Image (cartoon, helix red, strand yellow):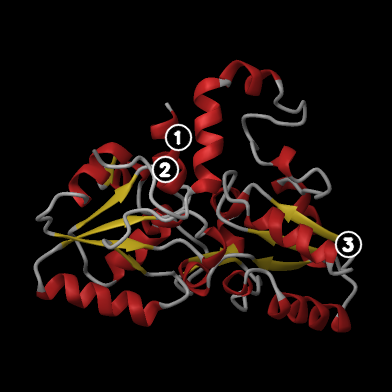
Amino acid sequence: MRPIFEKKTRRAFWPALLAVFFFPVVALATPAGANKEFPLRWEYPGVRTLSTAQLYKRFPDVVIVDARTQLEWEILHIKGAIVDSVDGKLFGHHFRMVLRGIRRKTNKPIVFYCNGHLCPKSYIATQRAQEAGIKNVYAYDSGIHDWTKAHPDLAVMFGQTPVTPAMWIARAQFRKHELSPAVFAGIVRKKHCDCLVLDIRDLAQRDTLIFPGRAHEARMDNTAKIDGLIRKARREHKTLFVFDAVGEQSRWFQYYLRKNGVHNYEFMRGGERGYINGIAL
């Protein structure tokens, strides 16, 4: 019988196990600050946030920092946002140096953003900035999706602005390439699978080992490696099976695949979180 979790998954395993046996207790203990629209806010109570309307009102007077990878920034970003691959360094020394460089030039508020309501990077970046002594920092936790829908003229996709509806990949088109975690895992674990598995999670998200011996590390800040794996899949006539942390980065990865003429690919719905929650349920 296959073990539910492999080695290095204890951090993810125990919350899932507790959810199974103590669900009523956990539900009652959910902090009052938690809400369905922004479910991660309660985890970062010291982080101040801005709404889309607030950011738009203050837009000329803030410094906006993209907490995602360079590739995600190239696909779609808030106009004027800087990136400098701050996430790839685990928000460590390089991240602090970037922020101190900003502070030497200006005292404007610094606003971090990432992919959306389930992406923790804007919170983590803001918290780490505060810990580094950087003041006047905020998280725009609605993320790039909400911003682009509200202000397409202040968003840039593949170097073009405004972002028009024709440039988007429809959610329905994305879902055509989604598989449930159970189906995804069942195919990947077959002895003979005509698939090449890509783990596109960032360094900071790799506390859980999924599909050991099958998954290739393909972080979105390493396009050279991604391109090599795409070529490998084509040579071997294999389908790309892709998973991320929470299902958000896969949407951007689809744009990159489309740009490179890749049509044979599948995503794991909900990413690592969907996989773990599926087992917990």
Q: Which residue is mark 1?
A: 277
- Image coordinates of residue 157 in percent, x first then y, are 47, 67
Counting residues from the N terminus, which is met first, the one under dot 2 or under dot 3? 3
Q: Quick one: SS at disc 2?
A: loop
Along the viewing direction, whichever of 90 and 16 lies nearer the viewer: 16
Residue 253 image-quadrant placement: bottom left
The amino acid on which the numbered mark 3 sits, given as a three-letter code, is Asn
Foreground tag (2 vs 3): 2
**Image point (76%, 76%), residue name:** 96
The answer for how far apart the CA atoms under marks 1 and 3 are is 36 Å
Identify the element where label 3 is drawn. loop
Up/down of 19 relative to 169, above or below: above
Foreground: 60 or 126? 126
Q: Amino acid at mark 2?
A: Gly
- The numbered disc on residue 136 is 3
Look at discs 2 and 1 and give the one toward the viewer. Answer: 1
Q: Is residue 156 visible?
A: no
Residue receiving disc 2: 270
Q: Residue at x 61, y 74 (%)?
A: 89
Count of number-bearing discs: 3
| Labels 1, 3: front one | 1
